[in-house]
Amino acid sequence: MKILSVNAGSSSLKFQLYEMPQEKILISGSMERIGVGNSFYTIKVNEEKIKKELELNNHEEAFETLVKELKANNVVDSLEDIKGIGHRVVQGGDYFDKSVVITDEVLSKIDELSSLAPLHNPAAITGIKAAKEVFKNAVQIAVFDTAFHQTMPKENYLYALPYSWYTNYKVRRYGAHGTSHKFVSQRMNEILGRNNTRLIICHIGNGASVSAVLNGKCINTSMGLTPNAGLIMGTRCGDIDASIIPYVMEKTGMNTREIDNALNKESGLLAISKKSSDSRDIEEGIASGDENCILAQKMYVRRIVDYVAKYYVEMGGCDAICFTAGIGENSMDTRRDIINELGVLGIKLDDSKNNVRGEERLISTEDSKVQCWIIPTNEELMIAKDTYELI
Ligand code: AMP
């Protein structure tokens, strides 16, 4: 069965077409600058990459172009071959604890939650509506980034704020990257051969979050109401003293939009290293003795270790720590720094096993008290799997 996995941004559309349940990728690609002029798309099919420039005025045109390419490349004979389309939706609030078939009611809930994800949910709606127009007979599924975290107990998702903020304005921890945390924890349990496990998943990329997964269910996660909580990220500050915000606003006269921009786009690794938000540049800086980069990395690692330690205690121990996403999969130095700091828990890195990028692998020693693994994430496949299962 052919399943299309879709991630729609306000001016972009990323997609992968899978043959399920074989999990075989038939075609993948992305369409950029939709509706803003000079649009183009890239497609990877049969190991070949194609790039074309074509004016795409809206997401419907993007899907129509995709269909033409699917036919031209003999990936499908007709539109009817595609039985399901899975859409990535960033914010599902507390309405959705799993992926669902998209009905009018689901669409209006996604719309209602737009104030919690103003950049992402409206874009997803645009993608869903366009896909419904073009693929009239396919089942449309919404896969929420927040759904996997809905199993958190109340003591972990509530903030100690005026209760009416929660009841009136839905202020609570929702978490993010749930599709990735779910994929990685499921894969880890598959490898361990059981579901009664205590896992700590470190999804560390440009955005970053840690989650505690007990017996296959998320019980805590570092991201909060928004994706700017928890870890230090490329340009996001993560956890801070909330009173810093009114203090700096009064001192500088910054408005809410400006302060939000500073916390999300001018903070994190970028602010401390004074150089870059990219961990490759930080590593280069460290190698040349750059003090700011050394400090940025120390702070970055410390925050991750804090969360790992916290979740270790919360779960009464841990069976495996998993590293995933851009930095988790590729940065040997960051993995080494984190695991070495966890030495007090009897966790030990095998340096030679750690010497790898982007490969599923055990990287701890045999006598390590907790196994450490690299598990490359695959959110697109998770979306396709959920879609296939629902159909
Ligand atoms: P993501 O958001 O998951 O795509 O991760 C992107 C981040 O991964 C980049 O900003 C880099 O900081 C990091 N990254 C990618 N490749 C490497 C690498 N070879 N070494 C260190 N960091 C890397």
Image (cartoon, grey):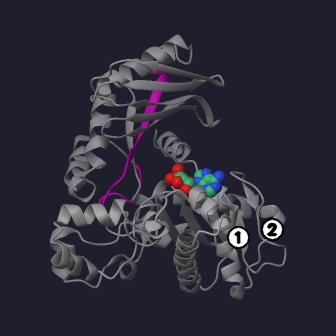
Marks 2 and 1 in Cβ contact (< 8 Å): yes
x%, y% of residue 271?
42, 67
- The label on residue 143 is none
x%, y% of residue 41?
44, 25
Residue under pointer 2: 351
Q: Earlier in the sequence, mark 2 or mark 1?
A: 1
Tell me: residue 19, above or below residue 169: above
Q: Residues within 10 Å of mark 1 (few under 14, many from 20)?
A: some
Residue in the foreground of this view, choosing between 244 and 155: 244
Q: Amino acid at mark 1?
A: Arg
Residue under pointer 1: 336
Q: Amino acid at mark 2?
A: Asp
x%, y% of residue 373?
70, 64
Q: Is residue 152 left or right of residue 172?
A: right
Asked if residue 356 shows in the view, the reply is: yes
Residue in the foreground of this view, choosing between 242 and 211: 242
Q: Which residues are magenta?
A: 80-99
Is the distance from the Cβ of mark 1 to the nearest ligand 1 atom less than 8 Å? no
Asked if residue 135 shows in the view, the reply is: no
Q: Residues within 10 Å of mark 2 (few under 14, many from 20)?
A: few
Residue in the foreground of this view, choosing between 260 and 66: 260
- Residue at the spot x=44%, y=14% of the render? 68
On whether residue 32 falls in the magenta region, the answer is no
